[in-house]
């Protein structure tokens, strides 16, 4: 694993809100991630969450058009909770340290992982930001996105808007079918040139949860598989939103509570661990 970050890479991430790392996984590690994901998905049997019978592609109450959004990608969340092999991969201290360094925080917790699988002829993902949908509000939350297939313009690569994480807000913009809807809220980016994240299988990207980003459609007859994980800085507090939290835990929280439940959001790295 290419997990040692240079200061140049950290500076680039801090300025732009994203970073790509070519050859992040070795060929052997890539096969482990692919095989582990396949087994974890088989075990989950299409259920989107560990605590729910909702199937991927069904109306989750967030997206208003299940037919359209069900063909954006198959999304399976928190596989680390239901598969030991995936837990070992997602809770890797090396990845946690990278996230901590990029975010410039004391420690990092898993918010949620998710398999994102674009099937043949899948719809695009419109421009959006992540953090406003989550159950905490922190400007340094971030995600890793690991490519398990070659990612091209044709099969639905990611696009990042450089520097947008510096002035976006925690207001919750809709992720709709209109690709550019978010630019009603952030018109200063309408004429900006996005970064096109074309990467090989085994490479990865990190992006800040407030970075404006999107993904294109899959215009091929093949699959575009990715395994991702969103990270929450240690010390983040509950903002009242349910998001991926199971009902019992959500009902036990009040706004301002520390989100430090290791069964839900495990601490995978802290500077004190070194």
Image (spheres, helix red, strand yellow):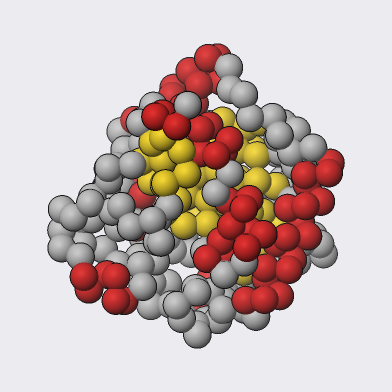
Q: Which of 83 and 163 is in front in this view?
A: 83
Q: Nearer the viewer, residue 273 or 213?
A: 273
Residue at left offset 75%, top offset 33% = 23
Residue 50 in the image, given as x and y percentages of width and height: 50, 74
Q: Is residue 204 left or right of residue 252?
A: right
Q: Nearer the viewer, residue 49 or 57?
A: 49
Residue at left offset 58%, top offset 22% = 5
Q: Can residue 264 be seen in this view?
A: yes
Q: Is residue 12 left or right of residue 255?
A: right
The vertical placement of 67 against 274, above or below, is below
Residue at left offset 58%, top offset 44% = 92
Residue 150 in the image, given as x and y percentages of width and height: 78, 46
Residue 41 in the image, given as x and y percentages of width and height: 67, 71
Q: Is residue 73 visible?
A: no
Pick the quarter of the image with the N terminus: top right
Residue 177 in the image, given as x and y percentages of width and height: 48, 64
The vertical placement of 188 against 46, above or below, is above
């Amino acid at each position: 694993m290419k997990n040692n970050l240079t200061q140049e890479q950290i500076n680039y991430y801090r300025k732009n809100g994203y970073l790509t790392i070519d050859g992040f996984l070795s060929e052997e590690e890539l096969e482990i991630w692919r095989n582990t994901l396949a087994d974890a998905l088989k075990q989950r049997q299409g259920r989107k969450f560990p605590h729910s019978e909702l199937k991927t592609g069904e109306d989750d109450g967030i997206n208003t058009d299940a037919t359209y959004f069900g063909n954006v990608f198959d999304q399976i969340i928190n596989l680390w909770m239901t598969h030991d092999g995936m837990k070992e991969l997602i809770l890797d201290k090396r990845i946690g340290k990278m996230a901590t360094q990029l975010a410039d925080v004391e420690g990092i917790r898993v918010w949620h992982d998710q398999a994102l699988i674009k099937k043949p002829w899948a719809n695009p993902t419109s421009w959006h930001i992540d953090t406003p949908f989550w159950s905490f509000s922190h400007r340094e939350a971030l995600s890793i996105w690991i490519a398990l297939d070659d990612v091209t313009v044709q099969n639905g690569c990611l696009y990042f808007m450089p520097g947008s994480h510096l002035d976006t807000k925690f207001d919750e913009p809709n992720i709709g079918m209109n690709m550019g809807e978010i630019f009603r809220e952030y018109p200063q980016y309408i004429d900006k040139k996005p970064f096109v994240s074309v990467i090989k299988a085994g490479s990865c990207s990190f992006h800040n949860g407030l970075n404006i980003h999107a993904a294109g459609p899959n215009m091929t007859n093949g699959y575009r598989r990715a395994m991702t994980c969103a990270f929450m800085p240690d010390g983040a507090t509950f903002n009242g939103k349910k998001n991926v939290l199971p009902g019992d835990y959500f009902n036990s929280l009040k706004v301002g509570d520390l989100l430090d439940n290791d069964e839900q959001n495990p601490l995978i790295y802290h500077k004190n661990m070194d």
